[in-house]
């Protein structure tokens, strides 16, 4: 090869190498090192809830099942909702919600729950008497709602499944034994206002109780129907929870929906 040509090629190689090194980022990994970002560690389960013996903020969520079924007619609990069934004229248990969620729950179970794969969650183990009560006051057990509510909320209550669901059932029973339930049952097919509902809470659970209640409504065609009420609670429910005392101890909240129809059972 011509000596001059060989020298030119060598010079071009050296200049090209220098340019490459100048353009190369200062923090580039050394040769042979993978540039793939390290895999993030799997999320850890959230810490366990505090003891159920201490005061805590809770929300009691009570559904009006006929209204729920207007927008969820394919649910098993809605298939045979007749006017004589308990949940046609009483409030149903949606849940009892502490402030935290998914306490001491594995990432896998949390993801199953978030994906709505409730049938793959571990069964809730209750004694037969309590299970019978729960099946009546929480018709969503036909869709494994109790598994979802335990995983997401009950694990943060600070007690076992039996204590969690017996407390929730007792609180709902107090609501269904009140003027609030009577107001709804006496006005099925009619419209109730937020103020009327809040006044019924004051009458049943003491002055100011209604200010701790929020109304939720859904749209069903041209109708606005009351689907749920959520009730703020503060304190320690204990073995014999005093719903009125727990409500009055909570902070006031906005009232939510201004009112709507108390939906009858069955498609409207």
Image (tube, helix red, strand yellow):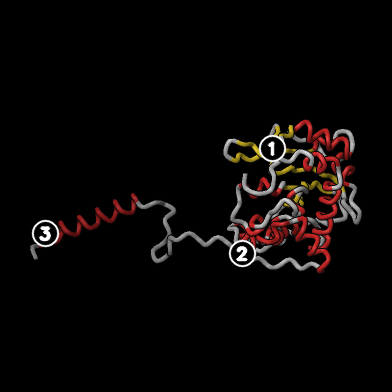
Quadrant in the rendering for residue 155: bottom right
Mark 3 secondary-structure assignment: helix
State the residue in front, 18 or 77: 77
- Which quarter of the image is occupied by the C terminus? top right
**Number of residues whose C-alpha sits closer than 10 Å to that of mark 3, classed few (under 14), some (14–19) or many (20 or more):** few
Compared across the picture, whether 44 is left or right of 159 comes to left
Taking the spot 20% from the left edge, 55% from the top edge, the residue there is 12
Res. 108 mark = 2
Tell us which disc is closer to us: 3 or 1.
1
Residue 261, which numbered label?
1
| Image location (x, y in percent) of residue 175 | 83, 46
Quadrant the N terminus occupies:
bottom left
Q: Where is residue 80 in the image (x, y as percent from the top left)?
A: 67, 57
Residue drawn 75% across the image and 51% down it? 92
Q: Name the residue under label 3.
A: 5
Q: Which of marks 1 and 2 is in front?
A: 1
CA–CA distance in space, label 3 to label 2 = 66 Å
Report if residue 45 is visible in the image: no
Q: How far apart are marks 1 and 2 (CA)?
A: 40 Å
């Amino acid at each position: 090869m011509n000596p001059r040509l060989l020298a030119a090629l060598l010079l071009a190689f050296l200049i090209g190498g220098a340019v490459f090194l100048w353009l190369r980022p200062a923090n580039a990994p050394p040769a042979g090192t993978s540039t793939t970002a390290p895999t993030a560690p799997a999320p850890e389960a959230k810490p366990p809830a505090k003891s159920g013996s201490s005061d805590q903020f809770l929300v009691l969520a009570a559904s009006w099942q006929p209204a729920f079924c207007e927008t969820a007619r394919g649910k098993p609990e809605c298939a045979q909702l007749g006017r004589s069934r308990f949940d046609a004229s009483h409030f149903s248990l949606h849940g009892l919600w502490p402030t935290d969620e998914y306490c001491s729950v594995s990432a896998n179970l949390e993801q199953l729950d978030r994906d709505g794969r409730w049938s793959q969650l571990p069964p809730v183990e209750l004694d037969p008497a309590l299970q019978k009560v729960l099946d009546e006051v929480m018709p969503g057990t036909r869709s494994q709602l109790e598994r979802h509510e335990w995983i997401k909320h009950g694990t943060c209550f600070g007690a076992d499944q039996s204590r969690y669901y017996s407390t929730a059932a007792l609180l709902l029973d107090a609501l269904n034994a009140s003027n609030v339930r009577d107001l709804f049952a006496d006005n099925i097919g009619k419209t109730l206002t937020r103020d009327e509902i809040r006044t019924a809470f004051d009458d049943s659970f003491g002055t100011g109780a209604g200010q701790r209640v929020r109304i939720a409504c859904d749209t069903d065609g041209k109708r606005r129907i009351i689907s749920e009420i959520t009730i703020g609670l503060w304190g320690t429910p204990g073995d014999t929870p005093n719903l009125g005392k727990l409500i009055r101890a909570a902070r006031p909240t906005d009232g939510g929906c201004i009112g709507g129809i108390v939906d009858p059972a069955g498609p409207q």
